[in-house]
Amino acid sequence: MSRGRWAGDLAMGARFAFTGGREGWIRALLTGVGVGLGVALLLLTAAVPSILDTRHQREAARQDYLLSPAKIPAADDTVVVAHTDTVWHDQDVRGRLLQPEGAKAPLPPGIDRFPAVGEMYVSPALADLLKSSGTGLLHERLPGKVVGTIGDSGLIGSHELAYYAGSEHLAPLIGKASVERIDHFGDTSDQGSEPLDPVLLLLVLMVFVVLLTPVAIFVATAVRFGGEQRDRRLAALRLIGCDGGMARRIAAGEALAGSVLGLAFGVGFFLAGAQLAGSIELFGISIFPDYLTPSPVLALLVAVAVPATAVLVTLFSLRRVVIEPLGVVRTSGPGRRRLWWRLLLPLLGLLMLAPMIGKGNSGGNFNPYLVSFGVLALLVGITALLPWVVERVVGRLDGGPVSWQLAVRRLQLSSGTAARMVNGIAVAVAGAIALQMLFSGVDADYTKSTGKDPSRTQMEVDLGSATAPDGIAGKLRETRGVRQAVALSETSFAGRPAGTEDTVQIMVGDCTALRELVKISACRDGDVFVSSAAFADPASRKLMTPGHTVWVDPTYSGGTKGVEARWTLPAELGRAQVRKDALRTDLTGLLVTPSALPAKARPSLSSSVYLLLDPKVPESDATEEVRTAALRAAPLANVWTWQSTQRSTRYDTIRTGLFVGAAAVLALIGASLLVSQLEQLRERKKLLSSLIAFGTRRRTLTLSVLWQTTIPITLGLLLAVVVGLTLGGVLMKMTAVPLRVDWPSVLSMTGFGAAIVLAVTLLSLPALLRLMRPDGLRTE
Amino acid sequence: MNAPAAPAGSLLTAEELRKAYGPTLALDGAGFSIHPGEVVAVMGPSGSGKSTLLHCLAGIVPPDSGSIMYAGREMATMNDAERSALRRSEFGFVFQFGQLVPELTCVENVALPLRLNGTSRKEAEKTALDWMRRLEVDDLAKKRPGEVSGGQGQRVAVARSLVTGPRVLFADEPTGALDSLNGERVMELLTDAARSTNAAVVLVTHEARVAAYSDREIVVRDGKSRDMERAV
Amino acid sequence: MSIGHTLLGLLESGPRHGYDLKRAFDEKFGHDRPLHYGQVYSTMSRLLKNGLVEVDGIEAGGGPERKRYAITDAGVTDVERWLATPEKPEEYLQSTLYTKVVLALLTHRNAGDVLDSQRSEHLRSMRILTDRKRHGDLADQLVCDHALFHLEADLRWLELTAARLDKLRAEVAE
């Protein structure tokens, strides 16, 4: 056979994909949209590395802190930067005060001149936010009027809230708050991002495998749209003299054309999606459309793999089909499906995962290939097992009302088609269940206790050493929504002014403040107490001898010069028992009332004000009031909200990513289910009409359609739960997390699958009702 | 040209039926009447409106205007559920093709109308088998429609149409897809069975030899009907 | 085929001479068997005797018989009755049926009605044959089938003609 004939056959098939009247066009369009959605998702996946990379680069390019401890002297090419980040109703606002020290001072990316004092450049999202109503407190917090916009190059996402404001007296604060002098923006030390730890890597790998496998299955289903019509057409071609090989090549050409159309659609969807992606924000992360650049290699892989898959799937589905001139004969016949080889794939998957059990806790690395292929084999194993399960179970069903009988009989006759329909959902659900289990298991590891007790204090205003706390605590106490505010300052002392490592903590606060830490009965200003939790080592003990002379804020060997304030400890040191619910848990030295400390030592104090909020004021309101008041009183203060636990944000991202991904994949599969459902219904138009003619209730037929989807989906979900739990169990073993089934997530995932079925049935209802109109009987 | 007022003793009478599908006028003042136990052939060229007449008479599609009286009740005022119930219990249907549910076995197909009326499955299939025996297809009970010949399938369909003991049997080109020998056998069985239960048969056909099994015929042309017996 | 009714029908469109009548008949229905003059004259005198036609006038100075005939009301009724009466179903009656259809068209009567009543008559015969067949032995069945198939062929021709009436009307009218 010459190459020309081959091309001719393929081209003829391609023509068939688009000709054939309205039906043909609809089929081509469905295939195109189906494959296109899959391709878009694949391209999105291929763009993920680029998204992460670009965000990382943007972040690195505006880095404005020094990585080395050496300080830079002021020059005409330096700028002093102060970090004034704040939070507005759970949204982070990146704030920077800039004080250029010369004509050659470096500009951060995104702005073309320094804002003058009282001026601000803001990100577009912040500009929009400021224009909205109810942001009065935010306005009060921001130091200046808006004179310009930060360009995209200075932002990591379209929805980032950020500002640069001009300032003039930052230099003296260097080192005291988050204020630094730098001579360039950007991270030039090419250290890259820290590598993902093996468990996180496993999670990321899993998310990709779990999301992409159903997409692949979906693409494979999409290219089979209209399969029965195609078979009939091929039979007609055989009648006019095509041989079997030609018929197969024509079928391949048809599939190829459909998938190429799908590729085009997919690129379209992807580009549209990228534009859309620039305008939305998910989990506090927004991106710019140009971040979505698929890596060329991966994009090429998609462009080659999708058409190749289409052709292979077509040829595979024709494997047991003999296209005769007078019709299509399926040679498989009613032969029963065998179990043994269907079990091979999942077993192989378990076998590949087995050697990695327990690797997680020893800091060992997982072999990413073995993990990926093992999980893949387990998940794809579902698609091999499901037809067998459906056939066996449906074969046993009998009895019940007419709607049930109609559905069961239909499933018995074509259990393979039914199983194929739900394969994707089963795989997606199984993967998602396994992942959810793994997540909930790893949860403990990645949710760290902060050691803070929100019932004692809800907010902390960290003033650093730049601001004295006394006046500020008073101001904050008067702020709406604040019930109590106590100030605590901290420094340290040593037995010598310099060159020592042995230091002891000093915690300074008035009697009220100290009572939040320790149990003391009598307290007057001027008293000094020793904490009951003070270090037991003799060197520290010796330093806390009453009447001893010590130096506050000594100069450490090799460090910056301290204030080295000479201080004679009082003759009497009280003993203070640390409260179990102390505001600070690190009380290892002296507790000092303010007047007991020499005035010379004051500049070394680093202070915080701890706040208890008034439960009568809504917490979010009180929080904003405090942030505003704190920033007005001390522009460089850091305001923290106390929580008992803190979760790794990276873990959170993966988890939400999985949720959204699983939802998207299930919706995608739901769409393909709907398409094949509608196709099936169209083919049965005559039958439906005649059933209606002899008085069948519409409800009966609707129910039978519902059963027809529900039965295979139920079986698919059951199998998915079994496989998902197994996989989840294995993964938990791998990460050495105690085995625990996260039933809520199992239920939510299966519930999601069930919701898809319901939605598909509901959406196909209008078509069903239309087809059930007796007009279907008209032939004239 | 139009049928005269309903003759006494008629089971199903229609007058002045009008029905349009979009711009096409399928029925334009057609009339009809049939007595219990009577076989009436509806003849006419393709596109004349004879199938539409049958669909209207059977309550499958409501006419745009006109009256259809069945056993003293006006069908035009019935809602869809009432008409469906009527079709389930009082009418039987045989079409040219596409009527047997391919997934169900033949006996299940025949039992289907009984099951829709709420008869238990066992009982329904027993009655179904009796009817299949009368139509000489009881040996096909466990086969699926795809496994039987066209003539056999049509006999199964006839058995199904009669299984509820309908008072009117609507047959739309029941032999259209069969050869003459099979077609005649189906017609013989159908008319014999209908006569034995005193059911009226509305037989839409364009074949004279099929129409010859009727007692009289009406002709539909351009949406108008002509009752030949009364016209002569 | 009734020549008398045919000639009467031809007169419905207006009075004609015997000679014209023969020519019109030959043109429309004669095909390969033209009418003899003698036949025309004998038929016309019979119709004259029965009062179905009258002599409208005689052309002077012409040939032997230059009578002009016109149809009477009784004649018109007779034609109508003839058209409405279905032919007894038998083999090879197409020519009669054809004549009836064409005449119906020529006289602006409903040719469809002619076909319908003929079909009805055929069906009556077919019903009798079908009934005989159902209750008879194999020989009966074969004999009846033979007749049934022929009758069916007539009817098919009728249906075909009915379907082509419009075209025929155009041709006849020219």
Image (cartoon, coloured by chain):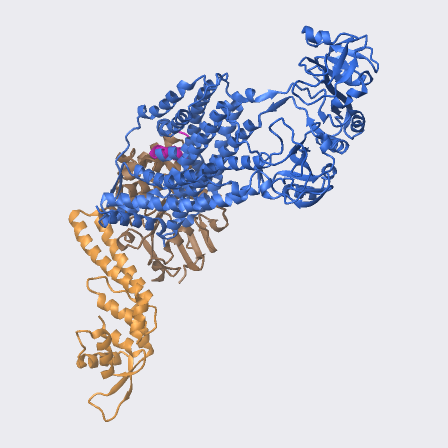
Chain colours: A blue, B brown, C orange
Q: Which residues are magenta?
A: A398-415
Q: Nearer the viewer, residue A481 or A183?
A: A183
Q: Nearer the viewer, residue A528 or A7?
A: A528
Quarter residue C157 falls in: bottom left
Main secondary structure found in the magenta portion: helix
Q: Residue at x 77, y 9 (%)?
A: A548
Q: Nearer the viewer, residue A131 or A216?
A: A131
Question: Can you name the residue that lies furthest to the left here?
Answer: C139
Is residue B82 among the parts visible in the rendering?
no
Question: Can you name the residue that lies furthest to the right here?
Answer: A524
Residue A408 within the segment the image draws in magenta:
yes
Quarter residue A523 falls in: top right
Q: In which quadrant will I find the C terminus of chain C?
A: bottom left
On screen, residue A197 versus residue B218, left or right, reads: right
On screen, residue A227 versus residue A474, left or right, reads: left
Is residue A729 among the parts visible in the rendering?
yes
Q: Nearer the viewer, residue C79 or A381?
A: A381
- Total numbered circles: 0
Q: Position of residue B220 (x, y in %)?
A: 36, 58
